[in-house]
Image (tube, coloured by chain):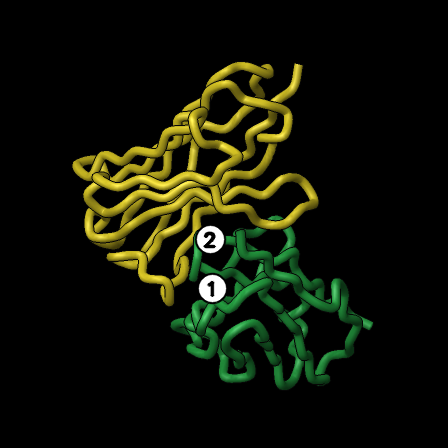
Chain colours: A green, B yellow
Amino acid sequence: EIVLTQSPATLSLSPGERATLSCRASQSVSSYLAWYQQKPGQAPRLLIYDASNRATGIPARFSGSGSGTDFTLTISSLEPEDFAVYYCQQRSKGLTFGGGTKVEIK
Amino acid sequence: EVQLVESGGGLVQPGGSLRLSCAASGFTFSSYAMSWVRQAPGKGLEWVSAISGSGGSTYYADSVKGRFTISRDNSKNTLYLQMNSLRAEDTAVYYCAKDSPVARPNDAFDIWGQGTMVTVSS
């Protein structure tokens, strides 16, 4: 099973700051990585697929990069609605999710 | 509007059974693979099962293989998850999620339902 490790577990930032979230795979997943956002009591929402492609309706402040084993989700300037938990997911071999990164208000 | 609505969750005793449903609308249901993903209270996401658009191919996580069965009725635009021999560790919110037509590795779940809670406890 491919294990995805997200870091940090919690990121404390202020609105307007830049957020950089990391997802590391235990073996190469090529570009087959997606990012989801989840707010309390809500279902996950797709942000990024295939490592760097924004899903429909996702603001340009969200960007994804990386390939192989190291991936990054960047939020260029945090809006109040961006404080949430973010998950990465691979389906290169099987389908697994990372443990999540919580972006909280500092 | 593309929408998925789950139902069928509830409280069940260990060893019991439950069937979840996911009603789809706003897209050609039979053209898309579908999955079930669960989330234990306070925990992360775990993929459970997937099914092709035709229903001819099914896939399961090791943790549920042999106990859960995924199926679909394309005439009713509905996805199902039959859960047998339930355990305490199956307690979670269960989400259905829309995949791409052929579930390629570079695709992702673009639409999710609101989830239905399953609690396994005596």
A59 relative to A45, above or below: below
Q: Position of residue B121 (x, y in %)?
A: 65, 19
Residue A95, numbered circle: 2
Q: Is residue B1 visible?
A: no
Q: Is residue A33 left or right of residue B111?
A: right
Q: Nearer the viewer, residue B60 or A60?
A: B60
Residue A46, numbered circle: 1
Q: Nearer the viewer, residue A79 or B66?
A: B66
Q: Are marks 2 and 1 on the same chain?
A: yes
Q: Nearer the viewer, residue B32 or A22?
A: A22
If you read the primary sequence from the N terminus, does the residue marked by circle 2 or circle 1 appear first? Answer: 1
Q: Write the residue at 59% across / 36% down.
A: B92
B16 relative to B23, above or below: above
Q: Nearer the viewer, residue A54 or B69?
A: B69
Disc 1 marks a residue whose amino acid type is Leu
Q: Is residue A89 left or right of residue B105?
A: right
Q: Residues within 10 Å of mark 1 (few under 14, many from 20)?
A: many
- Which quarter of the image is occupied by the C terminus of chain A? bottom right
Residue at the right extreme of this rendering: A106
Q: Position of residue A42 (x, y in %)?
A: 56, 52
Q: Write the residue at 59% across / 15% down.
A: B13
Task: Specify the quadrant of the image occupied by residue A80.
Answer: bottom right
Task: Specify the quadrant of the image occupied by residue A30.
Answer: bottom left
